[in-house]
Image (cartoon, rainbow, N blue to C red):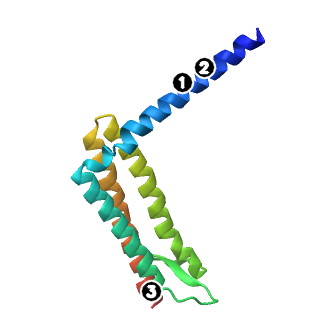
Amino acid sequence: MNQGNIKLKTGISKSLKSAFKLFFEKHILEKEFFRSRIILWLLALNVIANIANWIIIAIFINRLDGDIILHYNVYFGVDAMGDWHRVFLLPIIGVIILALNAVLAAYFYIKKERIASYILLLAAFMVQINLIIAAASIMMINY
């Protein structure tokens, strides 16, 4: 009886491994997702926008010992201050959102939901643009 359970478990394990291997060979090695020009353009725009965000912050951030203004509100004035390295959370959030949306876009693209994958990558690009605006605002407030 014990041997039957082992065979069953290894059979399930082997079938799961073969399914993953088949998925990897079919969709990743053949790069079906990366053959679309729209996908390539959207991914390139996302990466360029995120790199621009890193560069804006790296060039203009003043590495001081004191706190810098992280958020300014018209009604309340300065409502968030902190160390200079906290500004780098903006591009990190951009990378995380881009990675999640790219994975979801690849999944939907493989499932023949092309429009959904385009919308996910376009939404990630809009987030990148908003993060650039936020980083530029923080730089303008502090200088």
Which residue shows up at 37% across the image and 65% down it?
47
Secondary element at tag 1: helix
Which residue shows up at 33% across the image and 53% down it?
121
Image quarter hosting the N terminus: top right
Q: How many marks?
A: 3
Secondary element at tag 3: helix
Find the residue positioned furthest to the left: 37
Residue contact between numbered discs 1 and 2, judged by CB atoms under 8 Å: yes
- Identify the residue position indicated by label 1 in the image: 15
Please rate how many residues cluster around mark 1, counting C-alpha atoms within 10 Å: few if below 14, some from 14 to 19, many from 20.
few
Q: Position of residue 57 (x, y in %)?
A: 46, 80
Closer-to-camera residue (61/6)? 6
- Identify the residue position indicated by label 2 in the image: 11
Give the vertical position of 8 relative to 112 (above or below): above
Give the vertical position of 55 relative to 18 (above or below): below
Please rate how many residues cluster around mark 2, counting C-alpha atoms within 10 Å: few if below 14, some from 14 to 19, many from 20.
few
- Identify the residue position indicated by label 3 in the image: 59
Q: Amino acid at mark 1?
A: Ser
Q: Amino acid at mark 2?
A: Gly
Secondary element at tag 2: helix
Comparing labels 1 and 3, the label whose residue is closer to the camera: 1
